[in-house]
Amino acid sequence: MGYFRANIEKAKGYEPGFQPKDMDVVKLNTNEHPYPPSPAVMKALAEIRPEQLRRYPDPLANAFRQAAAEVNGVESECIMACNGGDELLRIAFEAFCDENRPVAYPVPTYSLYPVLANLQNCKAIEVPFDGEFNLPAKLAGTNAALTIVCNPNAPTGSFVSVEELASLADELSSILLIDEAYVDFAEKNCTELVKDFDNMILLRSMSKGYSLAGLRFGYAIAQPDIIAGLMKVKDSYNVDTISIALATTAIKDQQYFRENVEKIKLGRQELTEQLRALKFDVRESHTNFVLAESKNRSAAQIYDELVQRNIYVRCFNLPGLDDKLRITIGTREQNQKLIAALQDIVGVG
């Protein structure tokens, strides 16, 4: 028909993980938190008043900015609330990239990056990780306007040290966006680096560690001048009244958050050991999922047989990932159902 721009016509678009309609399944395919949000969040939801819905929300989400600033040890001017971490990525592409200003990132990584690059009609420079998923030395020399490092990385679960990322930021004369959507499950993060580097943006998500994937809420941490520039690109009211109230309540309940994160870490260790006992190759993960490769059966075969048992994991038809399964850490009961099914499928254990 010719109505769309050429790059939109050719675009495939991002493909989210399959969302089964049946709630009575073991769903370990989209890295959702297996435990419910803080009880304080549900109480805040019940207390939403009609008057709050009649009016527009705070365009800057200042209540959340203040709460997030206190948790991260920065000023509220260093925080921008977003409609999920994906909105921050879109904003960054619009703010920094165009036909003459490319983006660069290591691969394999989050598959939304090339989709956003195509929509913005900017060149995507993909620099391969090595076999150990070390930060590629060539990344610093791409002359990209925007460099993205997903850390911990999805879907590999690997982690680049804070010191290496500081060195990268120091080498770059352009923006470094560190996608820390999964950092709640790692031992370290880059919050302190933001105070030293005016070219760094951190992405944080409320979907993973805070059990709020259905809310769609994330935020940026950067120096005030960068935040002010990003504010020019965001929608006028990019986060709604209900999401501001619930996300603010969730991030304030750090005790509940920490307890649940520790449950995930324990489950991650147990599941890793159980998968290795079934002869899966499982790398150390710093996220709420593991990447597993079976030497006995293909990933696609295992995926199909798990689906027949109402168990869903993630299978990628992508170079370097097509022989692996990404498995979200579930509750202990969910993890045990998965292991029992895998024992039957791969014939080990």
Image (tube, rainbow, N blue to C red):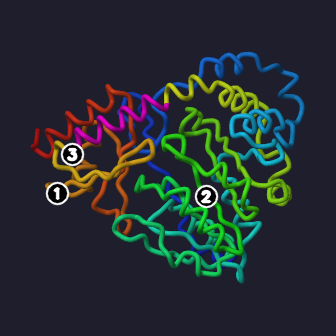
Inspect the image, locate mark 2, and give the three-letter code of the amino acid beneath it: Ile
Q: Residues within 10 Å of mark 2 (few under 14, many from 20)?
A: many
Q: Amino acid at mark 1?
A: Lys
Q: Residue at x 75, y 30 (%)?
A: 242
Q: Position of residue 135 (x, y in %)?
A: 48, 67
Q: Using the image, tell me which numbered label, if any, was put on residue 178.
A: 2
Query: Mark 3: which secondary structure?
Result: helix
For the residues bearing labels 1 and 3, Cβ distance under 8 angstroms: no
In the depicted structure, whether residue 337 falls above or below residue 282: above
Q: Quadrant of the N terminus?
A: bottom right
SS majority, magenta: helix
Residue drawn 56% across the image and 23% down it: 256
Residue occupied by mark 3:
276
| Of residues 19 and 89, the one drawn nearer to the viewer in this rendering | 89
User: Sequence-wise, which precedes: disc 1 or disc 3?
Assistant: 3
The residues tagged by marks 1 and 2 sit, at their Cα atoms, a distance apart of: 33 Å
> Which residues, given as a range, are shown in magenta?
261-275
Furthest residue to the bottom? 100
Q: Residue at x 32, y 53 (%)?
A: 283
Q: Which residue corresponds to mark 1?
A: 295
Task: First in sequence, mark 3 or 2: give its number.
Answer: 2
Asked if residue 173 is positioned above or below residue 25 in the image, the reply reads: below
Q: Does the segment drawn in magenta span residue 271?
A: yes
> How many C-alpha atoms fall within 10 Å of the one at disc 1: few (<14), some, or many (≥20)?
some
Dot 1 or dot 2, earlier in sequence:
2
Instruction: Give the spatial CA distance, label 3 vs label 2.
Output: 31 Å
Q: Tags 3 and 2 in contact by the CB under 8 Å rule?
A: no
Q: Please name the amino acid that badge 3 sits on.
A: Arg
Q: In the rendering, at what x and y percent does residue 235 appear?
A: 81, 52
In this image, 9 relative to 226: left or right? left
Task: Give the number of marks.
Answer: 3
